[in-house]
Image (spheres, helix red, strand yellow):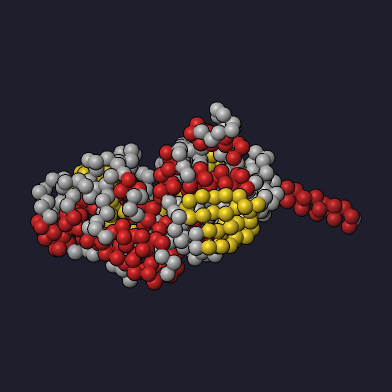
Amino acid sequence: MRTTILAATLLAGTATGALAQDRQIAVAVQNMAPYLDPGRDHSNVGSQHYYNTFDTLIEKDHTKAESVWKPGLATSWRQISPTEMELTLREGVRFHNGDTLSADDVIFSLDRIINATFPPYVIRQKDFVPNFAKVEKTGENTIKITTKKPEPLFETLLNIQQLMIVPKRYVMGLTGDPNTAEPADFEAFGLKPVGTGPYRISEFVPNQRVTYERFDRFWGEKAPLAKITMTRVPELSSRITGLKSGEFDLVTNVPPDQIELIASDAKLKVEGMVTPLFHVVIFNTKHPKMTAKVRQALTMAVDRKTLNEALWLNKAVVPGSHTYRQYGPLYMPELQMVEYNPARAKELLKEGGYDGTPIRYDTSAGYYTNGLLAAQAIREMWGAVGVKMDIKVDDKWTGNDPTMMARNWSNPMYFPDPAGSFGTMWAPGAASQSEGRFEPPAGYAEAWERFRYSTDVEARREAFAELMDKIKNDPPFLILYQPYESYGMKKAVDWKPLPGHIPYVLDFRAGRIALTLS
């Protein structure tokens, strides 16, 4: 009898273990990327996807907001001079196509960005690694990275999404000459991505669906899920209906006013956090109607605390300047570059020559959570000081349109330093200037150089304060808030966003998600 009971118990345990190994989840996301290439991408939509499939040379502890570095595809590293870092690579790592990771793959991955010729990579080089000069092999499993100037952010930059590692031979063989990296190869890679992470991408339908499957030859801890299917469901009501019906296990982009609808269901719950990203209003500083004083007036007319209360139920964070807690010693909440002062706004409109011309405000219908609602609320606030606003709803990006006057945008934290959010958007030559809507004022470039490349923290803090003061006096943007992003899920799903990630990452690696067997 004891033998029979023991056998039955072992059989049940084996069945439960097998079931656990085969666990799958279905995720409904608001948006889906048109390609999946971590080097090319810097969108909020794309950032959801890469961490499950790709690895960086240097990893970090994502459970912590501050930067705590860990070995990734590099097992060790040392800075051998102010402009040089040497790294030792992990041995025995496999790409999803079966190739073994080599120093050549790492050099190829970094060099395609550092010395970019493919136009999308050229932009990422300017945004993230303009100081990187070259990468070279120093041994069978060692490489050296050299910068143009002393680099205070070596480890930080070797952890960014844009420098995730891809397989050289696979990429070059996708089209044309297999011995040459061609633009067509990079375009093709975005549709058939291959990395070294715990999940391989088994299906990708651009703008619609991506499917991940566990990669059993992953060099690290085994992935907890056998399969993940992410499907684009742009309508909030459809995402919530699908969650309640059991079609989806997890849904993204739940606004605060819908949290209770999910949380009140006995089978469901909500997790969320303040996202390391700013929703901003950007101005075309080169538009003849958008003078510095008019832009100052428009910033002073917006009651950001009321927006937080009305749209985010006071869950968002309204900052004084372009600063995040994740910046550590460079977090500077004492800087106040935004003031709500409607009376002064009216005076500035007169001084700035505002003639009653409606301000065109561009927004997509649903790309940003509460984006359209915020635009409508700001229209009322601008109207209260005598400014007319015409809201133009269109999913097309207009940040490079010379007729654009104002629009919504986001400034994500791509890495935990002011250079990784403010810098990627507002540094001299960065996105805002290159798209033609921002011309840095006098002294701006010099202050930026001191901030970006000084190895002294106090010198960097002083220079950043100067930059914030210049932005205040000649504003190219208005920071609204850090949104509180919520995710609805079944109670059987043990998952939550982590403070050490860049915005919107859906991290399903080992230790990040667990499912209760039912």
282, above or below 455, in the image: above
Question: Image check: 41 left or right of 397?
Answer: right
Residue 477 in which image quadrant: bottom left
Query: In this image, 193 relative to 207: left or right?
Result: right
Give how far across and how far down residue 14 sits, in percent.
77, 50
Q: Position of residue 515 (x, y in %)?
A: 62, 53
Residue at 29%, 59% (x, y): give it. 444
Residue at image position (33%, 38%) is 396
Q: How many marks?
A: 0
Q: Residue at x 56, y 62 (%)?
A: 80
Would you say 487 lies left or right of 337 here? right
Determine whether 452 is above or below 134 in the image. below
Instruction: Return the residue nearer the eye: 229 or 319.
Output: 319
| Residue 424 place in picture, x, y as percent | 39, 53
Please tell me which residue lies in front, 110 or 479.
Answer: 110
Q: Residue at x 58, y 62 (%)?
A: 78
Let me know if residue 306 appears in the view: no
Q: Can you give x and y, in whole percent of width and height, for residue 455 in the image?
A: 44, 67
Which quadrant of the rendered structure holds the N terminus?
A: bottom right
Residue 333 or residue 254, whichever sits in front: 333
Q: Is residue 145 visible?
A: yes
Residue reaching furthest to the top? 176
Taking 117 as reference, is 480 above or below it? below
